[in-house]
Amino acid sequence: MKKITAILAIIIISCSKGDSPEEPIVLNDQNQITSFKLTINNETISGNIDQINKSITFNVVGADLTSLVPSVQYSDMAKLSPPKNESQNFNGEIIYNVFAENGDSNAYRVIVNNRPLGPENKIKAFSIFINNETIDATINDNLKLIIFNSGTFDITALIPSFTISEYATISPNTGVPQNFNNSVTYTVTAENGNIAQYKIITNPSKINGISTIAGTFTQNPTLLYVGAQIFIVGDFIDPNRPNAKLYLTDGINNYSLPILNSEMYSVNEYINEYNLYTKIPENVPTYGNYKIIYEANGFQSESESYVDILAENPPKHLSLNQDLYQVNDILIITGENLTDMIAIPSDGSVYLIQNSNNYDLSVNPERTEIKLTLDYYRLFPSYFGRGEEEKIITLLGPNRRVGETIKTVFN
């Protein structure tokens, strides 16, 4: 009996050691991307990881995304697809799957927002502060000109204010004083490297009109003979500006116009207007559509209206029969190709005189002599209680084409 008990005890002890169950194997369930970086233009950039929405975003500018190898960190024991050392084209959305050791997966969307480099290089607004007043300049984007009037105010050290295109840069920069008496150019560089240069034009010249001593007629073009005297009216057409000149152009050929005299007066405190007196030279050929150009410092102003010039058989005077004329004197003009009409200014008006009920003007058949009885009292300063005055008599051809002028004195 004792022997049987001992055997059972051995059997029980033996069974208790060999039949205990093994511990279960637990696999890692972590499947997160913890860092995602791209190297763009030699700069390493970290993406913004949204673990809730499982997205990784980048915001870059003007980047080449066609073949980039990301630097990725993710959970231990997990696997990544596609592999982290494989290049990708990030111009489109890329999906990265992270598989945990236990097989659970997360899909991350990698989105690279790649804004193109800004192409715009404009100055959108430009102003200066003069005489306690802000002056907004006119901007011509086609010609790349910035234009403002300053009159006679000091512009040797002005600090302009301006607005430029988004992402662009400008040189010289804001806050830098400029002497706008000199040629100043601003360079605007777009984000993509495109360059635009704006030239500053201060007190730009502008031809406002063409007039004659005989009055302003409405014809366009203005009809003239060679030898005619005219005056050009315009803003800042200053004959004393460096390299200032006046000329006629037919678009191909230029003909210099002498500046015989000039007058300046102020339209307002920022604009000075000039009258430039000139004479059509005899070497100018006949042409019906001349433009008049004023040029200074490389900047040109062109007349809006045209000038029709006739060079063949222009009227020319040779002499007058007197130096001083009074009421009822006989005016005799001698010359060549003399006209049927003359103009005489008086008391702010210009009288157009031809043979009529009012005037006995006559021209001989050879057109070498004009004769007129000066019996119209309003032509004389004495009628208005004034002393003798210089008069400028103008020869007028058909359609009031303006010819030479003759100076004399009326009392």
Image: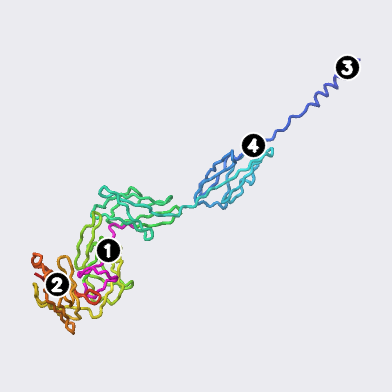
What residue is shown with label 4?
Answer: 30
- Name the kind of residue labelled 4 in the image: Gln
Q: Amino acid at mark 2?
A: Lys
Quarter of the figure with residue 12: top right
- In three-dimensional space, the C-alpha distance between marks 4 and 1, rounded to whole angstroms, equals 82 Å
Dot in front, 3 or 1 = 1
Query: Which residue lies most toward the right here?
Result: 1
x%, y% of residue 225?
A: 24, 75
Sequence-wise, the earlier of marks 4 and 1 is: 4
Q: Amino acid at mark 3?
A: Thr
**Mark 1 surroundings: few (<14), some (14-19) or many (≥20) residues within 10 A:** some
Name the residue rendered at 57%, 50% in the picture. Answer: 90
- The residue where tag 1 is placed is 208
Q: Per the image, is 245 magenta?
A: no
Vertical side of 390 occupied by 181: above or below: above
Q: Left or right of 279: which side holds 45?
A: right
Q: Say whether disc 3 or disc 1 marks the residue closer to the N-terminus.
A: 3
> Marks 1/2: CA distance?
27 Å
Left or right: 166, with 326 as reference point: right
Magenta span includes 221: yes
Q: Which residue is mark 2?
A: 407
The image shows residue 390 at horizontal and vertical percentages of 12, 69
Question: Residue beneath label 3, please?
Answer: 5
Q: Secondary structure at mark 3?
A: helix
- Magenta stretch? 199-228
* Cα–Cα gap, marks 3 and 2: 163 Å
Q: Nearer the viewer, mark 3 or mark 4?
A: 4
Q: Residues within 10 Å of mark 3 (few under 14, many from 20)?
A: few
